[in-house]
Amino acid sequence: MRKHKHGLLERGQMLIMFAASVGVLFAVMGLVFDGGRLYFEKTRMQGAADAGALAANWEQQRRNLGLVDSAGKDATELNAFEHGVSGVDVQVTPAGDDRSVAVVITQSFPSTFMRIVGWTSSDVSARAVASLVAFGDGCVIGLERSAGVDSIRAAGGGAISSSCGIISNSDIRTAGGGILTGAWIGAAGDATGGGYNPLPEENLPPVLDPLAHIPEPNFAGWPEGVKNTTTNTYECPGGQCVFNAQIRVTGGTWTFEPGIYALMSGLSVTGGDITGSELMFYNYNISGHDHIDLGGNGTIMLSPQSSGIYKGILFFASRSSVDAPPGNKLGRGNNASVINGIMYFPNEHVDWAGTSTTNGAWSMLIANTIDVTGTASLGNPQFTLPPDPSDLPDITRPMLTD
């Protein structure tokens, strides 16, 4: 009888141990399967948060501040986390200076094996922060993104030399002795021709316009500029002025007094010399035919403002400008010309030809498309960032910072 009771006791202990081991087994399975799923979802969610933060920051870069929230949520939705669906919560929180944005995604996932220990669901969240950070990689940037278009081209002996990057958002081409030399050369599309030093990287992600967040001048109410034929000067009352008629220089030596010149009908130099410092030329060019044309093989010596929101920018073409042929012609001065600062034509073509160079302390070219032909040399000795980085305007690009 005692032996029988002892056997029952052993069997009871075994049942208890089995039940305990089953519980442990389910707990381990829960950790493996439920934990693995949560890790998988966290990884997916983090990718969506990263995409949302960058998309929202891109709108900050473009100064479309009213689209920041929707851009962030649209990007997370494209990555399978739609705000308000299946318990997904997406919060887009811009920083106070509109240069940073945080995206936080939260969703609750039901447990499978962990239910046995009372753990019915788990909240998963991911956070990403993107900010506008200093952009100093490129001195020559072709912004056009259309497939099959050469946003940068050097042909007929034309050359571009840069101590920093040369970047094309589509294809890049050299032909007929054209040469591109840079710290690095990259193209979002293909690179054709052989005149590269170093060899270009192809199929890179396109870059955003690094000046897209800088506002265009609001010239309403600005006084009319003055052409003073007694002193051979162009004058800008109060430092900000509008020239409704085309500024046309056909001979002689003309000086531009410091200021921001809003040009309604463009700037044409077909002869003579022009000089000036502490300048910015804002070219409205809504017609598409009122370009900047620096020609006549004269001496051109121009430099930008050294302070203020437009510091470092010498030419600023309106983002509403129509891109119509023949485009802007910037390289017709002689090889004694000095052009400092940034030449910014975000929606237009720039043609650089002739024998002129950019012998200034520093210069950059950002345009929709760029052609260098003839014996022209952009950046001679080379395009470069300024010796003092504080001379640059607020050049930025969106990047994940957290």
Image (cartoon, rainbow, N blue to C red):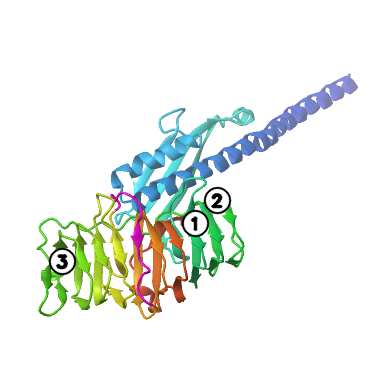
| Structural distance between the alpha carbons of marks 2 and 1 | 8 Å
The quadrant of the image that shows the N terminus is top right
Please tell me which of labels 3 and 1 falls first in the chain: 1
Amino acid bearing label 1: Ser
Amino acid bearing label 2: Gly
Task: Residue 43: give x, y in percent of width and height.
Answer: 57, 43
Question: Which residue shows up at 86% across the image and 25% down it?
Answer: 6
Give the magenta part as a residue range.
319-334
Amino acid bearing label 3: Gln
Which residue position is annotated with label 2?
A: 189
Q: Main secondary structure of the magenta part?
A: loop
Quick check: 27 above or below 174? above
105 inside magenta stretch: no
Question: Which residue shows up at 45% across the image and 76% down it?
Answer: 380
| Structural distance between the alpha carbons of marks 2 and 3 | 41 Å
CB atoms of marks 3 and 1 within 8 Å: no
Q: Residues within 10 Å of mark 1 (few under 14, many from 20)?
A: many
Which residue position is annotated with label 3?
A: 240
Please tell me which of labels 2 and 3 falls first in the chain: 2
Q: Nearer the viewer, residue 31 or 389?
A: 389
Answer with the quarter of the image where residue 301 lies.
bottom left
Quick check: 89 above or below 154? above
Badge number at residue 321: none
Query: Element type at marker 1?
Result: strand
Quick check: 142 above or below 306? above
Query: Element type at marker 3?
Result: strand
Which residue position is annotated with label 1?
A: 168
- Residue 116 visible in rendering: yes
